[in-house]
Amino acid sequence: PTGLVVDAFAALVPGGGIGRFVRLVAQALRTLPGAPPARFAVTRELMGAASKRYRPEEIVTLPLAWRELGALMMLGSRAPLRFDALYGHPAVVHSPLGYGPRFRRARLINHVHDITYHTNPEWHTFKTRTLLNTTAPIACREAALVLTDCDFVRKEVIQHFGVRPESVLSIPLPLDPDFQPLAVDVAKAHVMR
């Protein structure tokens, strides 16, 4: 196995939060000196968006639509299905959405931003909570490393999913390099608008 693969699905659809985080991770991996070479996994319906953001050699196109991949990941949580070949036999996979999938040889870095789908399921759609409650606990237990954004979520992952404490690391999210603090009067005007 060679290289790092990052699930880039969230970076290619409209939205903030995790999508912005994945875009920043990809930017850092592509531009910072000493960063490991990385490729970015996308489902087939996101190939057009991926080709506008990444070079062809950086893209790992999964031959599935997102719905098919989600269904396979749920099946793979219960059956001995592993995803190494689908992802191009990488050494490491970073899952910034926290659902895995499971691998035989690749080391998984499973990034969990929150587990509200588990603790407050009423806040999520049936599809989201079904996918994440089926896949995330198992992916967290099998991951080489689970990253969380804060100590609160770290403790929840350990308590609710039965993950070994030494496998869970809390690292606050970075600021966007374009972030600039606003002057107080400008911030107040923005809030008033």
Image (cartoon, rainbow, N blue to C red):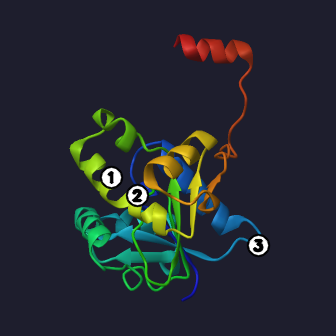
Asked if residue 162 is positioned above or below residue 2 in the image, the reply reads above
Relative depth, front residue between 43 and 87: 87
* SS for callout 1: helix
The percent coordinates of residue 8 (x first, y second) are: 46, 63
- Percent x, y for residue 164? 56, 60
Looking at the rendered structure, which numbered label has been put on residue 161?
A: none
Residue occupying image coordinates x 74% and y 20%: 183
Alpha-carbon span between mark 2 and mark 3? 32 Å
| Residue 2 vertical position relative to residue 38 in the rendered view, above or below | below
Q: What SS does tag 3 mark?
A: loop
Q: Which of these two is toward me, 12 or 80?
A: 80
Q: CA distance from mark 2 to mark 1?
A: 7 Å
Q: Quadrant of the N terminus?
A: bottom right
Question: What kind of residue is marked 2?
Answer: Pro
Separation (CA) of disc 3 from disc 1: 36 Å
The answer to the question of whether label 2 and label 3 lie on touching residues, with beta carbons closer than 8 A, is: no
Extreme residue in the bottom direction = 1
Secondary structure of the residue carrying numbered label 2: helix
Could you say where residue 43 lies in the image, as x and y percent from the top left? 34, 68
Three-letter amino acid code of the residue under disc 3? Gly
Name the amino acid type tagged 1.
Asn
Q: Which residue is mark 2?
A: 137
Which residue position holds label 3?
A: 34
What is the crowding at mark 2: few (fewer than 14 residues within 10 Å), some, or many (at least 20)?
A: many
Residue that label 1 marks: 133
Mark positioned earlier in the residue sequence (2 or 3)? 3
Q: Position of residue 48 (x, y in %)?
A: 36, 66
Q: Are marks 3 and 1 in contact (CB under 8 Å)?
A: no
